[in-house]
Image: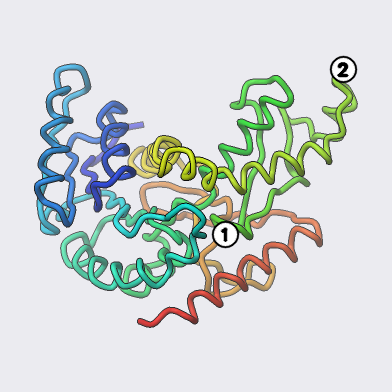
Amino acid sequence: MPVSRSKVAIIGTGNVGSTFAFALMISGLAREIVLIGRDKKRAEGECMDLNHGASFVPPVTIYAAGYEGCAGADVVVITAGARQQPGESRLDLAQRNADIFKDIIPRIAEHAENAILLVVSNPMDVLTYLTIKLSGFSPQSVIGSGTVLDSSRFRFLISQQCQVDPRNVHAYIIGEHGDTELPVLSHANIGGMLFPQYCARCNRRCDYKEEFGRIFEEVKNAAYQVIEAKGATYYGISVALIRIVAAILRDENSVLPISTLLHDYYGIEDVCLGIPAVVNRSGVERVLLLELSPTEQELLRHSARTLKEVIRGINL
């Protein structure tokens, strides 16, 4: 599909922002990449390092700028914020990063009035909600990275258990990108076969419900394990961001579990959660109403209540 315009602005030049810039350069999705960070020297250094590989990738212009660099951007990817520390939950970051967003979102909105805003910083669902309120943008134009990465982790671990290509595993994690997220077991399948049917024909004869429980716990705790081992997560989320940005720039109408503002979704109102939605050049085209089991519905409502409590506790 043709890319009508292809400028991406990245706010934040820490591990996630710089790794995403590298992945974006290699992908060929953008002809113009601008890095915007509080540490201008760091942003300039990242651009210099990236540009030294220009002869090996599709044509792209990469440079550092202030917030005026957001002008004309198709997508603004927001990775700025305090970093999650070992033992700290994403929700513990809420007030610190809300204070940062109070400063940066109006500055982005001033210059990037026609862009899609893609929020990555944690707690991502809370900050996606705040971005909608602080920017004045339509909810359709503000997307959180949602549970795209969580779902990819889920698919990978299932693929290892079942010994199949992860691209043929179809399973979603929905809700908060964090401790109250939930797996949609009622729809999980391999090649179109729901797991009760698939496992009945598999020679391994494992208890799929027990294995799903183990796998989900590993997915939910994956970020904590990576942070404890290496200090931060950035490779997986960078590839997930490439997938979301591609859906926008290529106008793909792709179904991705991004974080978006919900209205009357199993009674859930006025909160951002990761839910499968159609994503294209206009942002969120529409949200898909999954047929959830009663247990899944209640877990999703619990996730929404948890995030609403955090939002109410933030001093704006």
Q: Is residue 3 visible?
A: yes
Instruction: Using a 10 Å C-alpha cutoff, classify the residue at mark 1 as few (fewer than 14 neighbours), some (14 to 19) or many (20 or more).
Output: many
Per the image, the residue denoted by label 2 is 203
- Residue at 67% in and 25% down: 160
**Kind of residue at badge 2:** Asn
- Residue at 23% in and 66% down: 104
Quadrant of the image occupied by residue 63? top left
Residue 22: percent from left, percent from top: 27, 32
Residue 128: percent from left, percent from top: 42, 63
| Picture mark count | 2
**Kind of residue at badge 1:** Glu
Q: In which quarter of the image is the N terminus?
A: top left
6 sits left or right of 205 in the view: left
In this rendering, the answer to whether 167 lies above or below 72 is above
Per the image, the residue denoted by label 1 is 176
173 sits left or right of 293 in the view: left
Q: Under tag 1, what secondary structure?
A: loop
Is the Cβ of the residue at disc 2 closer than 8 Å to that at disc 1?
no
Residue 117: percent from left, percent from top: 33, 57
- Residue at 40% in and 35% down: 235
Instruction: Using a 10 Å C-alpha cutoff, classify the residue at mark 2 as few (fewer than 14 neighbours), some (14 to 19) or many (20 or more).
Output: few
Q: Mark 2 or mark 1: which comes first in sequence?
A: 1
83 sits left or right of 34 in the view: right
Residue 61: percent from left, percent from top: 13, 34
Q: Under tag 2, what secondary structure?
A: loop
Alpha-carbon distance for marks 2 and 1? 35 Å
Quadrant of the image occupied by residue 185? top right
Q: Can residue 256 be seen in this view?
A: no
Front residue of this view, candidates 13 and 111: 13
